[in-house]
Amino acid sequence: MKGTPIVTAYRSNEDLLELKKWFYDFDDAQDNRKRAIEKVKILLTRGRLPHGIEATSILTSVLLRDDDDDLDMDSNVAQLAYTMALIRFVNGLLDPFQQSNYAIPMQLLAKQLNLPTFFVELRHMGTHENLPSLDILRIATKDALTWLYDNYWCHVEGDGESEPLVNAEADAYAEVVNFRFIQFEEQISGFMVYEDLKTFKKLRKDNLEMPLFTNDCNDQDTFKLRKCVGELAEFCNSDPELLADLLIRRYYLIYPHQKLEAKGIKHNPLLKKLYIPLVDELGVRLIVSLFIKISKLLDGKELGEVNRRVYKKLGFAITFSETEVAQLVEWLPYIIKKMLSSPFSEENFTQIQISNQKELLKSVFDRVSSFCKHDDSLLVKLLQVMKESTRENVDPNLLKEINDNYDEAVKRANKKSFDLPPSLDEILAESVEKRQLQDEKQNTNRKRSKNANSSEKKVYLMEPHDDWTPTPFGMPV
């Protein structure tokens, strides 16, 4: 056995070869397409099928209904049928690769799958605009069937020749993973990100208390520092999300768990001193990306399958230990303060889709409340930062909500901190009370038992004697 067995609705690739022949090998003398559609319906009752099979069946069904001269179909109904078939064809291909909270443009996903953007445009028209004409829809449907043959059915071969489509979804993932890996690798190496970060650390680690740049200093080290920071700024403008992931998952902003254990510490505050000037220089877009990434980690949101595999190939960390997450939490006060106190510019916040300072404050408040719902101490700390960083022209209702949540969190945190354990007297009193209740219950049970047995004949250890008189020991009888 080459791998983990996979349950499929079909018995073997021979079933797929038969469907392939019925769908695509037809002429006027022999046409088994309707038979193929019926077989797909039967297979769907057994379980899920690869999208390529289901889409082929739907598109073929629409074509056959349109070609049937005996069926008097209204043109609007035909348009709707074609449009829905094409929408399902496109959605089924592209939706599995929407792995992030923010939608990736479908044109980009289509490019990664070598799907003509013509289909994406038709999907958009059918969803949001006037329906395309019947002529265009007929052409598009035939093109879709051709694309499915070239990208799916032509890879279906006998069991002895290959095994490509038993796990077709994994093959599609692999193609997208390789595309993104190459794209990210080219970006990182093209901007020399690792080299610049290494240079920055080397030049800054001995001058942590000094400003990043000074006007009166033009030596060789300052020139190198300006150069590497400038290149990092270009990369940040190109893809701030990738840079944020790189800084977190390649352990620049935090120490890995093993290093913390070796040093016997929980976090290293010098890392913040080292990298805060760089983050300041790279701008608010990077800070927003860092906030989103850390928020997702604290909320327990896992990576999507595509991102997980891409990050693994890039050498990024996939999961984090508690100590590593705790280090990321230490960055939150600085990040939140920087986001809220910087002059607002809508282009800096396209990732979270907000257009003004009020929406920004609301978004930050909602995220903080979400990942701090079980940690009142952290909630108090971050809400305090928000209150101190909030500008004057904010919504008073929102500000009141923040203040109310802050006060409630303070009360809960103080109650947990100052609640004393029960005293010895309280513990003993509670035990005595419980014991008394138990004794009363036992006595009641005894009385009930005694009353129940009172009518029975008494049994004595010795025989009773009528002439016997009790006498103390040592006294004559």
Image: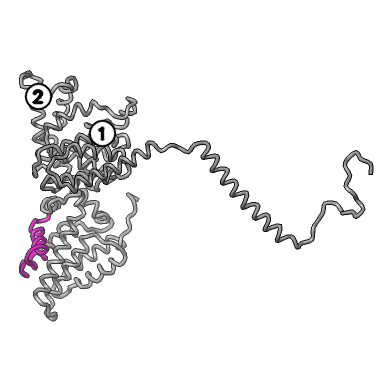
| Foreground of the two, 201 or 336 | 336
Highlighted range, magenta: 114-141
Instruction: Answer yes or no: is residue 245 visible.
Output: no
Residue 78 as seen in the image, left or right of residue 254: left
Secondary structure category for the residue under label 2: loop
Tell me the kind of residue under disc 1: Glu
Instruction: Answer yes or no: is residue 51 visible.
Output: yes
Residue 432 as seen in the image, left or right of residue 11: right
| Foreground of the two, 151 or 430 | 430
Residue 429 in the image: x percent, y percent? 55, 41
Residue highlighted by disc 1: 330
Within 10 Å of disc 1 (Cα), the crowding (few <14, some 14-19, many 20+) is: some
The residue shown at (18%, 19%) is: 206
The residue shown at (32%, 37%) is: 321
Secondary structure category for the residue under label 1: loop
Location of residue 392 (image quadrant):
top left
Label of residue 213 in the image:
2
Residue 221 in the image: x percent, y percent? 10, 20
Residue 250 magenta-highlighted: no
Residue 96 in the image: x percent, y percent? 21, 54
The residue shown at (9%, 24%) is: 213
User: Mark 1 and mark 2 in contact (Cβ < 8 Å)?
Assistant: no
Tell me the kind of residue under disc 2: Phe
Location of residue 263 (image quadrant):
top left
Residue 124 magenta-highlighted: yes
In the depicted structure, whether residue 93 falls above or below residue 41: above
